[in-house]
Image (cartoon, grey):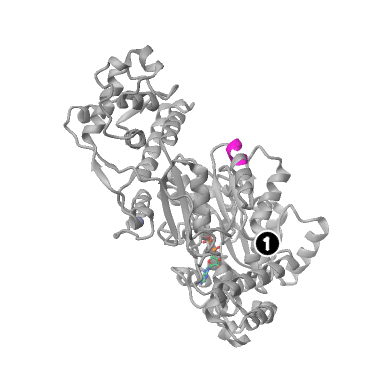
Amino acid sequence: MPESIADPIHTLRTVFGYDGFRGQQQQVIDTVLAGGDALVLMPTGGGKSLCYQIPSLLRDGVGIVVSPLIALMQDQVQALRQLGVRAAALNSSLSYQEGGALQAQLAAGEIDILYVAPERLMMEQTLAWLARTQVALFAIDEAHCVSQWGHAFRPEYMQLSVLHERFPHVPRIALTATADQLTIDEMVVRLHLEDAQQFIAGFDRPNIRYTITEKSNPKAQLLGFINREHADDAGIVYCLSRRKTDDIAAWLCQQGKRALPYHAGMTQGDRQRNQSRFIREDGIIIVATVAFGMGIDKPDVRFVAHLDLPSTIEAYYQETGRAGRDGAPADAWMAYGLQDVIMRRQMVEQSDADDARKQVERRKLDAMLALCEVIGCRRQQMLAYFGDQLDHACGNCDTCLTPPQTWDASEAVQKALSCIYRTGQRFGVNHLIDVLLGKENERIGQLGHDRVSTFGIGRELSATQWRALFRQIVARGLVMVDDEYGGLKLNANSRPVLMGEQTVTLRQAVKKERVSSSRAAKRSGVVEWQRPEDVALWEALRQCRKQLSEEQGVPSYVVFHDATLRQMVEMRPQDLIAFAAISGVGEQKLDRYGAAFLQVIVGAL
Ligand code: ADP
Ligand code: ZN
């Protein structure tokens, strides 16, 4: 390639159709182009792929990308081919003939970027072939898979240190979105990246709006949220159990949504089919257990909803992180209540883990609960957990947008604690609330709880307010949950409150969320278009994209992202020159799709 166009920004514009680099992309690319190693930590959606794709195109030889997931590889290859990049994947799904054809192309220097599964790369045969080949770089994607302590450990990744030994002059770039300092240190050692330049971006995902709402009627709340904010959008709904997953998916379908379940109890075939529909079709909602998500890099997931509480902030961050990879606004929404707190506390206590492990799990759960109950900015609190400092409230989370009301609940909490004590420290919340409210029922009579001193001392609050109070004191660890029956007991933290030595400020219980909204269904995609002609054009463009993507058997976002369509609506280009100026339109896509979309735009006027 002549010097003059071996220029990253030129490639960014002509091939990818983007105007400028984001974050540290440029520095990473310069490092690798100059032959240096790089270790890149960027959050999901940060734009890691370009960091190795552009150097692969600009350096002589083929860029080898190690990627743990075959499904993901194929998506990336498809997307690159749409851009006119000569990309291919080498993995076990290739037939013998396909493998042979690929070998020939590689030998002829006709491939710029080759995705390889780690076990395939480590085969002696592959390594021998590499030794005879001009390699532009090695990119090790999802590099945290090398960490034995992480959740995604892949033994094959351990062997990747061989690359450094056998190909000392080929630059290597390791990339990940999930790494704390320990994992980073481990990556450096295991992959021999001591000399690599480190590019560490923060964890923040500014386009994701975090909302954690009090659970009252979760199904109706979920539907209300979807209808209000994401009527036609793709999203993921996480549930804890398989049964609930099936149930919620079926119920959403009855409500007119296109929802599909996904969990480990389904056959491989059914799972695969639902996942593939989610990726390929527009606006599908997948209702899943945590089994779903690894390796989903669908960029236009507009929301992730949780109907059950994740056990750690790490899990919450990772699951919600699947929303909005394309950088456009997205929602992380959760409904959370007293039962979640009690159940998670019980799960920790009942687990088979040893004491040290349990201690860690308790701390992690405490942090997750604190995030749920936080009064200040949620994003700040979450980033602080990862060691990131955000020095201002974010303005894009529920607590920033609607600051919660607080109240001095010291006296009420004392009543609750004392009620737990007077009834013998073995009853659950419902019974305790009945006693506090002075309910006359059979059970209370039998137990003689109408004669304890706390009977009826809590009539100033409603049952809902008491539930919110109990949720918060359990979440804060001011009382303990019995691991078997969920009864509440006092602990060391209860004492100072009971003695009046410590005040307790709690969140005010919110009034019931409106579950239906007049705004319902007005929103389409990411934007709320004001003018009817914009809505019409947006729909027509989506239709055009759908048709083109079906013709080629690729997901619709591979044709154009939502953000690109949105610009078409805003700018209404009238000719190919104007069309080419839209972000996401590179030379290939201009050739391929320019005319079709222009016709829609011009026709719409
Ligand atoms: P990651 O792998 O870090 O999660 P990707 O590489 O998949 O992120 O990029 C996320 C999205 O952002 C992709 O849709 C990509 O096309 C887009 N993107 C990346 N870099 C840029 C850029 N410089 N300008 C515009 N869009 C970009
Ligand atoms: Zn905030």
Q: Quadrant of residue 129?
A: bottom right
Residue 114: in magenta span = no
Q: Quadrant of residue 559?
A: bottom right
Q: Check the image and report above or below for 441 versus 253.
A: above
Q: Check the image and report above or below for 574 versus 520.
A: below
Q: Check the image and report above or below for 427 versus 112.
A: above
Q: Residue at x 31, y 53 (%)?
A: 403
Residue found at the very far right of the displayed protein: 97
Q: Nearer the viewer, residue 289 or 110?
A: 289
Q: Residue at x 39, y 42 (%)?
A: 368
Q: Residue at x 57, y 56 (%)?
A: 165
- Where does label 1 land, which residue? 130
Region of the chain picked out in magenta, as a range: 242-246
Q: Is residue 87 left or right of residue 217?
A: right
Percent across and percent down for residue 262 are 63, 44
Q: Quadrant of the N terminus?
A: bottom right
Q: State whether residue 176 appears in this view.
A: no
Percent across and percent down for residue 213 are 41, 47
Q: Quadrant of the C terminus?
A: bottom right
Q: Is residue 263 left or right of residue 450?
A: right
SS category of the residue bearing label 1: helix
- Magenta stretch, main secondary structure class: helix
Q: State whether residue 511 appears in this view.
A: yes
Amino acid type at mark 1: Leu
Mark 1 burial class by Cα count in 10 Å: few <14, some 14-19, many 20+: some
Location of ligand 2 given as a quarter of the image: bottom left
